[in-house]
Image: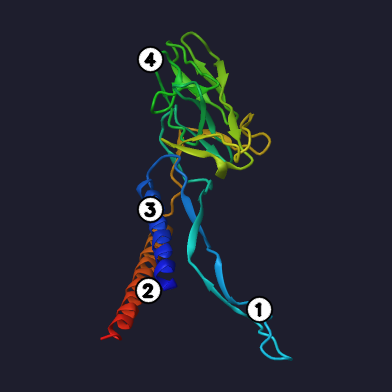
Amino acid sequence: MRSLYTASTGMMAQQLLIDNTSNNIANVNTIGFKSSRAEFADLMYQVLEYAGTATSQVTKSPTGIEVGLGVRPTAITKIFTEGNLKQTGNNLDVAITGKGFFKVELPTGAESYTRNGAFKLDQNGALVNSDGYKILPEIVVPDDATDISIGTDGIVTVMQPGQTQGTQIGQITTINFINPAGLHSLGDTLYLETEASGVPIEDTPGLNGLGTLRQGFVELSNVQLVVELTELITGQRAYEADSKAITTSDEMLQTVVNLKR
């Protein structure tokens, strides 16, 4: 019976939907996290009668008979809409308002990208993320700095004893991609470039479509809990309906077997 196999593909698809939704809900408070959306497509069809088949000498079938064989996942797409900003009062926290990513150097020397701007200083005064990975271009804050200021264009200045004006020590640049959804999720809110994402386009914040920076803020997760809970309920009900289809098919088969008795 086709329904057994068709319904099983539906159960697997809904399980993937629930898995993805669960991950979104689990990261509702993760700084810089971007939600994902599961996408599906119907499988091939078994044609029992083609449309246009002659039904008499003068008439033809207007629709034909095609039976679908289930569903398959096609993609899990990252949604890079901007999350709400939260003021922290920490001068090292930076949020991007608009498009763009910060560039981070991994321990392997490879470059990764993130929207999480909860930065800190390491033992050498370098600006790093929560895992200690350096921000690129590298920013090193002098030991005697009494204050640090990060402009909307990424210019970093510090105040030092005996000075009346700030000293510029570097600039934070941001990165954009033609297709951010094609980035590879590495975990820790980090992403890697792929062929699908396109090459990174680095520029000054606020120029060429890139967002500006806000010091003392972090970008919260863009997960909308109400939407995710609705998806969870929908996926659960669809999973139950598919399992019911399998149970019904099994009962029909049992009826056929009992005809021999």
**Which type of secondary structure does the marked residue at label 2 adopt?**
helix
Tell me which label, 3 or 4, sits earlier in the chain. Answer: 3
Which label lies toward us, 2 or 1? 1
Q: Is residue 226 visible?
A: no
Q: Residue at x 59, y 27 (%)?
A: 173
Whole-angstrom CA distance, mark 4 to mark 2, is 61 Å
Residue 245 image label = 2
**Which type of secondary structure does the marked residue at label 1 adopt?**
loop
Whole-angstrom CA distance, mark 3 to mark 4, is 39 Å
Point out residue 193 in the picture as x, y percentages from the top left corner. 56, 34
Whole-angstrom CA distance, mark 2 to mark 1, is 28 Å
Point out residue 212 in the picture as x, y percentages from the top left corner. 58, 35
Q: Mark 2 Cα within 10 Å, few/some/many (few <14, many 20+)?
A: some
Q: Residue at x 34, y 69 (%)?
A: 243
Quarter residue 205 falls in: top right
- Provide the residue designation for mark 1: 51
The amino acid at mark 2 is: Ala
The amino acid at mark 4 is: Gln
- Provide the residue designation for mark 3: 19
- Provide the residue designation for mark 4: 123
Which label lies toward us, 4 or 2? 2
The amino acid at mark 1 is: Ala
Q: Indicate the quadrant containing the C terminus: top left, top right, bottom left or bottom right.
A: bottom left
Whole-angstrom CA distance, mark 1 to mark 4, is 73 Å
Point out residue 50 in the picture as x, y percentages from the top left corner. 64, 77
Which label lies toward us, 2 or 3? 2
Which label lies toward us, 3 or 4? 3
